[in-house]
Image (cartoon, grey):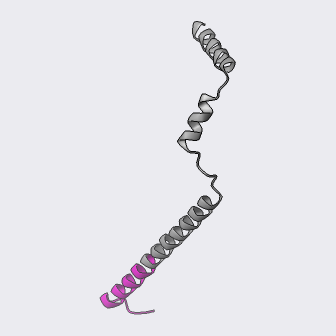
């Protein structure tokens, strides 16, 4: 059994601190790599965003009968 003096305890404390900080550094580095990988995959397979002009064109092309039916349904719902 080693002699428990202050220098031995300090060296054990430093070793434990270095091991703990190394593990934290490793895990955080691994987390960064995983997040970057997911970002690359997401941007690669993400659909192309729709422009505002296309959205407005789609909204303006709604049939008037559909608008009338929605308006009637909302009025009946509110009257209950």
- Verify whether residue 71 appears in magenta: no
- Verify whether residue 6 appears in magenta: yes
**Residue lying at 58% horizontally and 65% vertically, measured from the top left:** 40
Is 13 on the left or on the right of 26, as rendered?
Answer: left
Quadrant of the rendering where the N terminus is positioned? bottom left
Which of the 4 quarters of the picture holds residue 51? Answer: top right
Q: Bounds of the magenta span?
A: 1-20
Quadrant of the rendering where the C terminus is positioned? top right
**Residue 29 position within the rendered picture, expressed as x and y whole percent measured from the top left:** 49, 73
* Residue nearer the viewer, 2 or 34: 34
> Measured along the vertical axis of the image, is residue 14 above or below residue 28?
below
Is 34 on the left or on the right of 3, as rendered?
Answer: right
**Residue 65 position within the rendered picture, expressed as x and y whole percent measured from the top left:** 69, 17
**Residue 47 position within the rendered picture, expressed as x and y whole percent measured from the top left:** 64, 52
Q: How many marks?
A: 0
* Residue nearer the viewer, 31 or 64: 64
**Residue lying at 58% horizontally and 37% vertically, measured from the top left:** 55
> Measured along the vertical axis of the image, is residue 16 above or below residue 58?
below
Which of the 4 quarters of the picture holds residue 79? Answer: top right
* Residue nearer the viewer, 3 or 20: 20
**Residue lying at 30% horizontally and 87% vertically, measured from the top left:** 6
**Residue 49 position within the rendered picture, expressed as x and y whole percent measured from the top left:** 58, 49
> Measured along the vertical axis of the image, is residue 10 above or below residue 57?
below
């Amino acid at each position: 059994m080693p002699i428990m003096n202050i220098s031995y305890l300090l060296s054990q404390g430093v070793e434990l601190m270095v091991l703990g900080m190394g593990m934290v550094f490793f895990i955080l580095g691994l987390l960064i790599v995983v997040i970057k990988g997911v970002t690359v995959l997401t941007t690669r397979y993400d659909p192309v965003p729709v422009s505002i002009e296309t959205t407005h064109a789609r909204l303006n092309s709604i049939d008037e009968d559909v608008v009338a039916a929605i308006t009637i349904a909302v009025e009946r719902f509110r009257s209950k």
